[in-house]
Amino acid sequence: MTQNAGMIGQAGLQFFGKVCASISHDIKNVLAVINENAGLLEDFCLMTEKGRPIDPGRLKRLAGDIQEQIRRGDRIVTGMNRFAHSADAPSMDVDLSELTDLLAALALRFAAARGVQVHVKRPLGAVRITTAPFVLLNLMWLCLDEAMASAGSDRTVELAAEDAVDGARLRFRRLQGLKSMRDGLPPADVSMALCSYLKAEVSSGPDATEMALLLPKSRG
Amino acid sequence: MAEKVLIVDDDKAFLAILSERMQNRGMEVSTAASAAEAMKLLGKETFDAVLLDLMMPEMGGIEAFQIMRRTQPEVQVIFLTGHPSVTKGVEAMKLGAMDFLPKPVDMNELSEKIKQAKAGRMILADRRTQDKIKKILTDKGW
């Protein structure tokens, strides 16, 4: 039990670090674009001083571009905030479909690096369970990593959260050649510890095109 | 003659604005949103400098640089990165990159580096031409 707790803690730290590093990279990119926009404004001022008129339409577009980058930065920080708050409590009532949206947003850069698109198919209503949200996100991350490694020829992984008997299910679809989940997700010891803690189960479909993460209504 | 620059970055907003600023400074600028796009352009045109993002999807900057060197050996590459690290910087310089600059970029510093890149590329191109001429003359017994 203590060994599992230690493993979950260590895995959680690594997961948290990896995601934060990715977010910081995204924020830096936003700042770089805003910096260039500010520089361009400065360039326009210098050009005006030399007698070259400024096109008001160009200035308006520039203002719009800056505002778009602010919105982009705001989306990134909002995601980061939701991710940080997922560690608030060891047990919370959550909507699995919202957690899935958050997972897809956090994994965007990693998916792009592997040439994979992650598409979320939203259910009609909320899919509510009581769980440890941060630990669940960690397990979902490992599942998504394995799913991306098995992405099909269209390089798209589809995520779909749904209600299941006595719980909920998150499907990872449009895969190809997915290996058996009998030995767990890599790293096996970590994924097994996470599954045990969450009372979850990861399985692969018979035709190796789908993986499913089954979760209880409440981990108790 | 204006410096001819290729900017390679997967962030299209950054590509567009940096390109405009450099064009306002009189440079001739081409852009590529991926390493694959950059390779196509390098196959058709010669550039004085390539500004290469270190972290790109599918093919990163270091790998792209190694391939670029095979197509245009004299090309001068300046890496741009949001997170400069000593390890990556040393790796890039060992491979022959001209420089390694952090984002956000200082435009004055970048413009100066590009002027140096053009001078550096012309020296290397001249040297290659001289070596070719020497070889031809040597082969003819002169």
Image (tube, coloured by chain):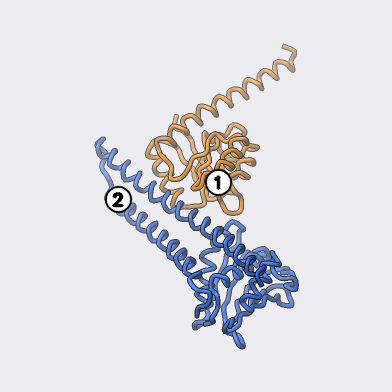
Chain colours: A blue, B orange
Crowding near pointer 1: few (<14 within 10 Å), some, many (20+)? many
- In percent of width and height, residue A126 lies at 50, 82
Residue ID at (64%, 40%): B66
- Label 2 in the same subunit as label 1: no
Q: Amino acid at mark 1?
A: Leu
- What chain does badge 1 belong to? B
- In percent of width and height, residue A205 lies at 71, 77
The residue carrying mark 1 is B54
A52 vs B17, left or right, is left
Q: Nearer the viewer, residue B141 or A184?
A: A184
Residue A154: in sight, yes or no? Answer: no
Q: Amino acid at mark 2?
A: Leu
Quadrant containing the C terminus of chain A is bottom right
The residue carrying mark 2 is A59
Crowding near pointer 2: few (<14 within 10 Å), some, many (20+)? some
In the image, is residue B137 above or below residue A58? above
Q: Nearer the viewer, residue B132 or A202?
A: A202
